[in-house]
Amino acid sequence: MTSDEIFEHLRERDVNKIIELYRKADKIREKYVGNKVFLRGIIEFSNYCNNTCSYCGLNSNRPGLKRYRMSIDEIISAARICAEHNIGTVVLQSGQDHGFSVDWMVEVIRKIKKEFGLVVTLSLGQRDYHELKEWKAAGADRYFLRFETSDDELYKKLHPGKNASFTDRIKVLEMAKSLGYEIGSGIMIGIPGQKLESLLDDIALFNELDVDMIGVGPYIPHPETELGKQKIQLQNVDELVYKVIAITRITKPYTNIPATTALATVNFLDGYKKGLMCGANVIMPNITPIHYKSLYEIYPTRLSKLSEEELIQKIKSFIIECDREVGKGRGDSLNFLRRREAF
């Protein structure tokens, strides 16, 4: 698919042509990664953050937010839910929290590996080479870090401050890749000031970085952030998200693509369903304990009354209703496996 063709798809308003794009992406998904939908259990173990990002409800300048950091035993208890429900991957996610040590995270990783044998994905923000190396040696398998936007000026608006650097973020992904991590990244769509041209660049960067998992979700304004007080300039944001998912599947057929948590926040099962119909093959249920989940407020969330176990069962039933199969095991990105075999 050429850049001109991608841009035309992004601009397209004809419903029939948009539906045809989704169908094409879904066929490519079936051909290259099959009908299995893999689950990844997210544990949001800390809402501490050193950053001052203008869009994020966890930013260090936000007053009044109760901060927490789960204990190792609490994290292990949450990971046990994954093991008990045959979810092969646990995702350890936090803000840019420098309040835990490298060795503390090493212990968490090793315990999860020893007790459950789960795949461990880390989503811990921008980290240095030493940290990434130690965590990989401890058994971490994947690293996820959104670059959010490839538009450097827009990136600076998201990350105000002298130390905000888009290239530094990309370097983290490259370091993780060089260490043997399966790497994931992603973008937000609907950021104030974002243009279709920058989305075109984002899609090109997915290919340039050769990422193994790509998360595409809507920007959800948080009313207590600087950016959340501005109006969204891009129109039809949800539709654009699905278009980018579809285009990404077509251009990166072997990559794992989740129907993101942000889509489900906007519209729970319908968000997941549309994501799957556009080429997604991963769903990431949040298994953070409920008393912490309400405090991990990157954006305003609609807390489910379901327990973690009930949520997982509901998602599994939904996958089957969509004529897809619940994946078991590691669910490694075929993009990653193909690249590793090339070496």
Image (cartoon, grey):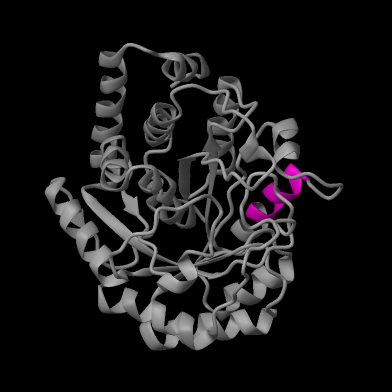
The extreme top residue here reads 14
- Seen from the viewer's position, the closer of residues 169 and 157 is 157
Q: Which residues, given as a range, are shown in magenta?
A: 165-173
Image position of 220 (left or right of 88)? right
Q: Mainly helix, strand or loop, the magenta region?
A: helix
Q: Give above or below for 79 relative to 180.
A: below
Q: Is residue 256 above or below residue 182?
A: above
Q: Is residue 266 positioned above or below 94 on the image?
A: above
Residue 233, horizontal then vertical, whole percent = 58, 23
Residue 166 located within the stretch drawn in magenta:
yes
Residue at 27%, 79% in the rendered image = 84
Give the number of callouts: 0
Say which of 252 and 7 sits in front. Answer: 7
Which image quadrant for residue 208?
top right
Q: Residue at x 59, y 20 (%)?
A: 197
What residue appears at the point 68 percent right and 31 percent down from the top-left corner?
151
> Does the stretch in magenta take in 13?
no
For this view, does 280 lie left or right of residue 316? right
Q: Position of residue 257 (x, y in %)?
A: 39, 46
Q: Quadrant of residue 191?
A: top right
- Residue 302: where, in percent of width, then height? 40, 53
Query: Residue 16, position in %: x, y?
Result: 25, 14
Q: Residue furthest right?
A: 162
Question: Which residue of the protein is positioned furthest toward the front in this rendering?
Answer: 64
The quadrant in which the N terminus is found is top left
